[in-house]
Amino acid sequence: MIEEFEGFLENGSPDVEEAIRKAAAAEIVPRFRQLAAHEIVEKNGPHDLVTVADRLAEEHLTASLTRLLPGSVVVGEEAVHADASVYGQLAGDAPVWIVDPVDGTRQFVHGDPGFCTLVALAQGGELLGSWTYAPALDEMAVAIHGQGARLNGRVLGSGTPTPGQVLEVATSHPDFTTPDQKRALLGLRVEGVQPRPCGSAGLEYLAIAKGELDALAFSWENAWDHAAGLLLVDEAGGAHRTVAGERFRIAGGNALPFTAARDVATVDRIIGLLSGGGA
């Protein structure tokens, strides 16, 4: 299936980058540390926030990305919040853009630069391209299926953790997890592993691709949070798997939690701990 998009991904990827930069420049960056109280709304509780920047950036990207690839559709976080049926397009035949306009909205609201815009292109459940843009950090990471990953044009490689070194693992933030999900992550509380709550999911994936974070363990499956990062990690030399031993399915129905890590050996170790198999 990737062959159908080789030309677009080779020649159109810079256009996708430009569309993302333009959306961020128009709708996100001017509002960073400038949000008024009425521009911030709770969606499903005090920790689940949305801002005018999220909504307008997604609208901007929806228009520009579908113009770049006629016949494509968009599954965006805010569109799905408004109409849950939109999520079903992930299982359709059309090429689909998976968009999180502001990943790390809480950080964005608090004036923390640790937020990003996530875009992935998929068809038939296969991830084809990935773009992670952190405007406040001036970082643009791009991954193309089978062609590797780059950060600001530089080749990314996740490498392997240093033998004997404590593994740093980002986990689902306790503010966003149920009691059952918290219990599922308790297996990581062993000697030699240092779990910590995650920030922006997209930037945690990028940290793995850069070799700055060893692994993550997440207990939710919203495609907009994971699609871009999973391809980025894979193309940087890392790996991922669910506790069922399967690759993550972007359309849903995954056994949770799942992990992504710098190498296969680390994936095996984290999955063993999450499954109760010991260190």
Image: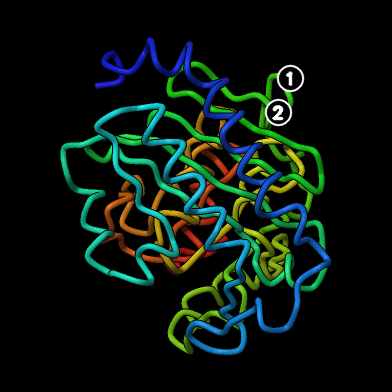
Q: Amino acid at mark 1?
A: Arg
Q: Residue 18 sits in which quadrant?
A: top right
Percent across and percent down for residue 277 are 45, 64
Percent across and percent down for residue 98 are 41, 47
Circle 1 — which element? strand
User: Where is 178 relative to 260, above or below?
Assistant: below
For the N terminus, the image quarter is: top left
Percent across and percent down for residue 116 are 66, 51
The colour scheme applied to this rendered structure is: rainbow
Do labels 2 and 1 touch, CB within 8 Å? yes
Q: Badge 1 local density, few (<14 within 10 Å), some, or many (20+)? A: few
Q: Residue beneath label 1, please?
A: 154
Q: CA distance from mark 2 to mark 1?
A: 5 Å
Percent across and percent down for residue 84 are 27, 69
Which residue is at 48% across, 36% downward? 231
User: Where is 24 relative to 176, above or below?
Assistant: above
Circle 2 — which element? strand
Q: Residue beneath label 2, please?
A: 151
